[in-house]
Amino acid sequence: MVALVVALVMKTFLVQVFVIPSGSMEQTILIGDRVLVDKFTPWFGAEPERGEVVVFKDPGGWLENQHGASTDGVLLRGAKQVLTFVGLLPSDSEQDLIKRVIGVGGDTVECCDDQGRILLNGKPLDEPYLASGNPPSRQPFKVKVPPGRLWVMGDHRDVSADSRFHMGNPGQGTVPVSGVLGRAFMIAWPVGRVHQLDVPVSLSSVARGPTDPGTARNAVGVDPIPEEPPLVMGVLGILPLVGRRVGRPGR
């Protein structure tokens, strides 16, 4: 009982591990990596900053539920629900994604200048984290991010179903700050890839834009939306730190 209480507190308030099921954040984060997500500092009012990698709830229409009906019996299904609730099993119903914050409330994000670079408040961005061979964006767009929302993009731009592909949704492709579960601050597994996820200076150093109501304009959706796995699977944060493999392989 004490162990279950500790697990629940860890998962809810402190640190949670998420198993990465897709390549949308390559080469920064690879398929199957376990990332540690800080769920503690948001309780004290900390908000996501540009350049941070964040895990957030589907703001609506980004993912589709692809789970079939369960074939488990009543007892097994109940046991799984309890273990999922405390974080000892990954959830089949959570709709979570992981992306990098490019713009915050008041920022104007635009693709692209004559050298193909993303513009943030008129300044071209140096993006060394992009996957090899990927341009900053193949889709032209221009958006002013509304207050309390974020413009997010994957590091593997050619396969990431990020803000660019949802500009027709409510929020014009932005996600609410309230839907952010926490910042991914470290890759914890596999051992050979353990390292901290730093915030690029090129993003954090740009001055903020005025925080008047934002609007999307000149958005052009030219390609089909890349396929995005329906969830980033959350599991108890402390277990990989003591060398135990947790959860299912990323899909």
Image (cartoon, rainbow, N blue to C red):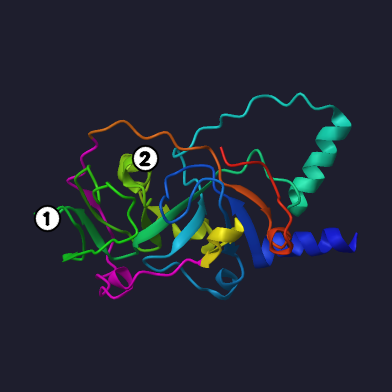
The residue stretch that appears in magenta: 196-221
> From the image, which quarter does the N terminus lie in?
bottom right
> Does residue 82 appear left or right of residue 214 in this picture?
right
Overall secondary structure of the magenta stretch? loop
Answer with mark 2 or mark 1, whichever residue precedes in sequence: 1
Secondary structure of the residue carrying tag 1 is: loop
User: Where in the figure is residue 112, as x and y percent of width and height?
Assistant: 16, 53
- Mark drawn on residue 159: 2
Q: Is residue 198 magenta?
A: yes
Is residue 144 part of the magenta span, yes or no? Answer: no
Horizontal side, residue 232 vs residue 207: left or right: right
Q: Where is residue 97 in the image (x, y as percent from the top left)?
A: 50, 48
Q: Spatial distance from mark 2 to mark 1, Cα to Cα?
A: 21 Å
Res 172 seen here: no
In the image, farthest residue toward the front: 192
Indicate left or right for 164 with 241 as reference: left
| Residue located 85% across and 61% down the image | 3
Q: Which residue is drawn at 50% across and 37% down?
A: 229
Identify the image quadrant of residue 210: bottom left
Type of amino acid under label 2: Val
Q: Quadrant of the C terminus?
A: top right
Residue 167 in the image: x percent, y percent? 31, 43
- Confirm or deny contact between disc 2 and disc 1 (CB under 8 A): no
User: Which residue sits at x=48%, y=37%?
Assistant: 63
List the residue tagged with mark 1: 115
Quarter occupied by residue 41? bottom right
Q: Residue 143 carries which label?
A: none
